[in-house]
């Protein structure tokens, strides 16, 4: 219980400091793992706004692991999309290319970032039109953890 309170206080302090950055409030969701520890959390979860009728969108976030063991994320699901994949962007012969990732590792006591130009979520075939300000809940499947995160649609930062 004491550890839970300490982690909660740390999470609130982090929220306060992030809220002061760039004047844009962060979209932060604490982990709701299948077991009682709160090892995994997600901050700054957002989806890049796309033109009307777009069949693919990209999602970004930072995953934080407060445990002493690495956490491997292998899948993402969402009611608003027919399919969600973990992807990476890489440069090959001067051209940017994307490839699916089988897993995203969140290091022990560390974080993994999903960001434009790097690792990201590829959100395919949206079930509804999403515009700036809308939210979509995505579930990250990471080892024993199932983390629901509200991703806010916005124009590029």
Image: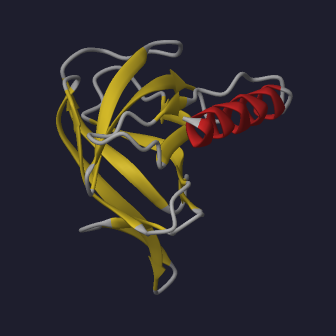
**Residue at 42% of width from left, 44% of height from top?**
37
Position of 126 compared to 114: left or right?
left
Q: In which quarter of the image is residue 18?
A: top right
Q: Indicate how the structure is coloured in the image.
A: secondary structure
**Residue at 83% of width from left, 23% of height from top?**
23
Query: x, y (%) of residue 9?
Result: 71, 32
Query: x, y (%) of residue 103?
Result: 29, 66
Q: Split into 4 quadrants, where in the image is the N terminus?
A: top right
**Residue at 74% of width from left, 36% of height from top?**
14
Q: Extreme bottom residue here?
A: 93
Q: 1 or 12, which lies in front?
A: 1
In the figure, 54 relative to 131: above or below? Answer: below
Total of numbered circles in the picture? Answer: 0
Q: Extreme front residue here?
A: 1
In the figure, 63 relative to 34: above or below? Answer: below
Query: x, y (%) of residue 35?
Result: 30, 42
**Residue at 46% of width from left, 47% of height from top?**
40
Position of 20 compared to 40: left or right?
right
Q: 14 or 68, which lies in front?
A: 68
Q: Split into 4 quadrants, where in the image is the C terminus?
A: top right
In the figure, 37 relative to 131: above or below? Answer: below
Position of 84 compared to 36: left or right?
left
Q: In which quarter of the image is residue 31?
A: top left
Position of 16 compared to 103: left or right?
right
Q: 54 or 69, which lies in front?
A: 69
Q: 112 or 99, which lies in front?
A: 112
In the figure, 49 relative to 141: above or below? Answer: above
Query: x, y (%) of residue 61?
Result: 52, 44
């Amino acid at each position: 219980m004491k550890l839970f309170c300490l982690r909660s206080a740390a999470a609130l302090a982090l929220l306060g400091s992030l809220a002061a950055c760039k004047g844009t409030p962060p979209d932060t969701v604490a982990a709701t793992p299948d077991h009682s520890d709160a090892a995994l959390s997600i901050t700054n979860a957002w989806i890049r706004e796309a033109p009307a009728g777009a069949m693919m969108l990209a999602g970004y976030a930072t995953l934080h692991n407060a445990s002493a063991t690495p956490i491997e994320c292998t899948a993402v699901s969402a009611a608003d999309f027919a399919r969600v994949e973990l992807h990476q962007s890489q440069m090959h012969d001067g051209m940017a290319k994307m490839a699916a990732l089988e897993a995203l590792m969140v290091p022990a006591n560390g974080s993994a970032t999903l960001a434009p130009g790097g690792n990201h979520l590829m959100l395919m075939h949206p079930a509804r039109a999403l515009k700036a300000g809308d939210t979509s809940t995505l579930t990250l499947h990471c080892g024993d953890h199932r983390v629901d995160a509200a991703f806010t649609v916005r124009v590029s930062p």
